Amino acid sequence: MSVKSKTRGSAFGRAFAVVSAAIAVSAAVENRRRPSSRDLTTLGIDPQAFDRLG
């Protein structure tokens, strides 16, 4: 497998992870639940800072 192919796969995987995390966080907030720390971190949001929102 070439480096270019690995990079493309890596970028696609990262994009998929971000979209999935965004959907999960959106659903949690909509249902008045706390999103998972993993999903928040994937989106670049500090989980402790999220707790201070309110």
Image (tube, rainbow, N blue to C red):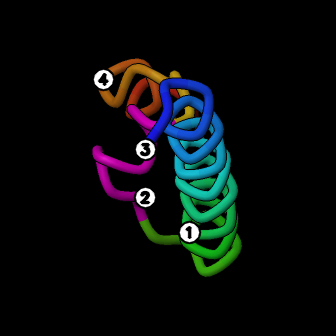
Identify the amino acid type marked 2. Pro
- N-term-proximal mark, 4 vs 2: 2
Read off the residue under disc 2: 35
Pointer 1 with pointer 2, Cβ within 8 A:
yes
SS at circle 4: helix
Q: Which mark is residue 48?
A: 4
SS at circle 3: loop
Image coordinates of residue 24 in percent, x first then y, are 56, 69
Q: Quadrant of the C terminus?
A: top right
Residue situated in front as seen by the camera: 12 or 50: 12
Please report the residue visible at 55 percent of the width from the left and 42 percent of the height from the top: 14
Image coordinates of residue 9 in percent, x first then y, are 56, 47
Judge left or right: residue 54 versus residue 39: right
Pointer 4 with pointer 1, Cβ within 8 A:
no
Identify the amino acid type marked 4. Gln
Q: Which mark is residue 1?
A: 3
Read off the residue under disc 1: 24
**What distance separates the C-alpha of mark 2 from that of mark 3?**
37 Å
Image coordinates of residue 32 in percent, x first then y, are 56, 72
